[in-house]
Image (cartoon, rainbow, N blue to C red):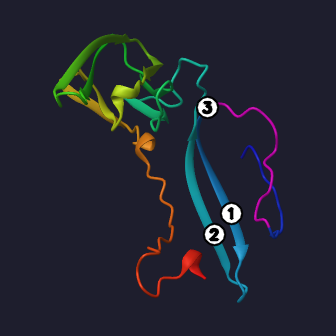
Amino acid sequence: MIFEKTDSTKPTGNWQLATGNFSQGWYVTEATSKDKYGQDVKDVKYFQLYDMKVSSLPAPGYTWNTIIKNVVEPGEKAQFISGTSANDIFLVQQTNKTSSDDLRLTNNYQFITLNNEKKTFEFPVTEEDRGGFGVSQFFIKDNRIYSNSWNVMMPWTNKQLDITFETYRDKTLPAAKKNGK
């Protein structure tokens, strides 16, 4: 056990963890309480912490991935982290984009070497990327294929409608009231 705290419920439902540096890896949190009948109620959650500044993985595994940011606007960057605890990985990365002009699909391939590390992958987006695009990665190790894919979402926020309601009265029609009077 690395941390324990006894607390009572508060109107906000929030309470502070102890400040300190937790190393990357798997953790479990367990909350125990009593219900209105005096029976124990327990909830257990498992979670993984990782450090973006450290190149090692939080736990051994052939493939490890996480999304940093995948909903973006023009000028921003989509970010993903991929890693492996294996050596000499030849990673193939494919980016699938559809051109907004002629709806043609373009594939861009990159080849990356990973050696017991994790790397951050960034994808700058422009106005032409509206609607989003896909990123896929795969590699083969020990006669097995490992793959992962992400969607970069770039909503059509520049096409949002601004709707206003107004009243129009034609003054030339019989019994029409001017300015709603």
The amino acid type found where label 1 is placed reads Ala
Q: Secondary structure at mark 3?
A: loop
Q: In the figure, residue 133 lies in which quadrant?
A: top left
Q: Main secondary structure of the magenta part?
A: loop
Residue annotated with mark 2: 42
On screen, 159 above or below 133?
A: below
Answer whether labels 1 and 2 touch (C-beta < 8 Å).
Answer: yes
Where residue 175 appears, as percent x and y from the top left, is 46, 88
**Image quadrant where residue 29 sits:** bottom right
Residue at left offset 50%, top offset 67% = 165
Q: Which residue is mark 3?
A: 24
Where 166 sits versus 152, above or below?
below
Find out whether the residues at labels 2 and 3 contact each other: C-beta distance under 8 Å.
no
Which three-letter amino acid code belongs to the residue tagged 3?
Gln
CA neighbours of label 1 inside 10 A, class few (<14), some (14 to 19), many (20+): few
Residue underneath mark 1:
31
Quadrant location of the C terminus? bottom right
Image coordinates for residue 56, horizontal then vertical, percent: 53, 20
Q: Which residues are magenta?
A: 12-23
Could you classify mark 3 by the number of other residues whose Cα lies within 10 Å: few (under 14), some (14-19), or many (20 or more)? some
Q: Which mark is residue 58?
A: none
Q: Nearer the viewer, residue 57 or 142?
A: 57
